[in-house]
């Protein structure tokens, strides 16, 4: 085997390892449902929800973001939101109206893949009068294959904040 062929083969293996992620997991468009939990009483509260694609390079910048500042019309949070606009899928959720889907066929998944997204940050605008605690109104989702059962996840939004209906599958040893 010539030196050029060896270099090409090594580069191909490295490229596949980078794209494939560690542990056999790779970026995967999940079937996401976002909405109020079943049985939630009808409410006039509307929740603004941003699902933001974040690369490793941007992770520190968005970590611990204050949800109320994120959705404000001006200020540092609003500036961060504007910066991430092209990597954001925005939804509005109201109890009693059912869930909204971000299907694997949604074009935002292509944007996230091209941007080397390693996690999604779900940020919910807290209703007036509630504490904008990031631990209540934000959640991280890792869009990797073999991470969630059937590659689907439900994100529930109500007066108690935002939560995921399933945890990632345990790592296989």
Image: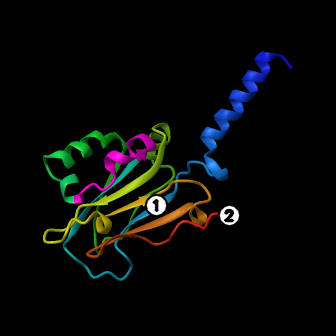
In this picture, is 63 found above or below 11?
below
Query: Magenta segment: does it hold 97?
Result: no
- Magenta span covers which residues? 54-67
- Residue 41 image point, x, y percent: 28, 82
Q: Residue at x 68, y 63 (%)?
A: 172
Q: Which mark is residue 76?
A: none
Q: Give the alpha-carbon distance from disc 2 to disc 1, as whole Å.
A: 23 Å
The colour scheme of the drawn protein is rainbow
**Residue at image point 66% right, 37% down:** 16
Where residue 120 sits in the image (x, y, percent)? Answer: 42, 53
Q: Quadrant of the C terminus?
A: bottom right
**Left or right of 70 on screen, residue 91:** right
The earlier-in-sequence mark between 2 and 1 is: 1
Which residue is more in the foreground, 18 or 71? 18
Horizontal side, residue 155 vs residue 22: left or right:
left
Give the foreground label among 2 and 1. Answer: 2
Q: Give coordinates of residue 85: x percent, y percent.
A: 30, 42
Q: Residue at x 36, y 83 (%)?
A: 39
Q: Are marks 2 and 1 in contact (CB under 8 Å)?
A: no
Q: Tag 2: Cα neighbours inside 10 Å, few (<14), some, or many (≥20)? A: few
Q: Identify whether 69 is placed above or below 93.
A: above
Asked if residue 61 is among those painted magenta in the image, a careful observer would answer yes
Q: Secondary structure at mark 1?
A: strand
Quarter of the figure with the N terminus = top right
Which residue is at 66% across, 40% downward?
17
Name the side, left or right, on which 113 lies relative to 81: right
Mark 2: secondary structure:
loop
- The numbered dot on residue 32 is 1
Residue bearing mark 2: 172
Q: How many marks?
A: 2
């Amino acid at each position: 085997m010539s030196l050029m062929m060896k270099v090409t083969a090594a580069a191909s293996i490295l490229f596949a390892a980078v794209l494939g992620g560690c542990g056999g997991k790779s970026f995967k468009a999940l079937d996401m449902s976002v909405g109020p939990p079943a049985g939630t009483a009808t409410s006039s509260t509307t929740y603004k929800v941003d699902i933001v694609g974040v690369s490793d390079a941007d992770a520190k910048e968005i970590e611990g973001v204050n949800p109320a500042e994120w959705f404000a019309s001006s200020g540092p949070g609003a500036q961060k939101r504007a910066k991430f606009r092209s990597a954001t899928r925005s939804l509005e959720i109201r109890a009693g109206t059912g869930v909204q889907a971000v299907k694997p066929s949604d074009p935002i998944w292509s944007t996230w893949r091209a941007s080397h997204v390693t996690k999604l940050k779900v940020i919910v605008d807290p209703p007036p009068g509630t504490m904008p605690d990031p631990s209540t109104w934000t959640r991280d989702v890792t869009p990797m294959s073999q991470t969630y059962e059937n590659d689907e996840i439900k994100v529930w939004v109500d007066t108690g904040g935002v939560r995921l209906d399933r945890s990632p599958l345990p790592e296989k040893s």
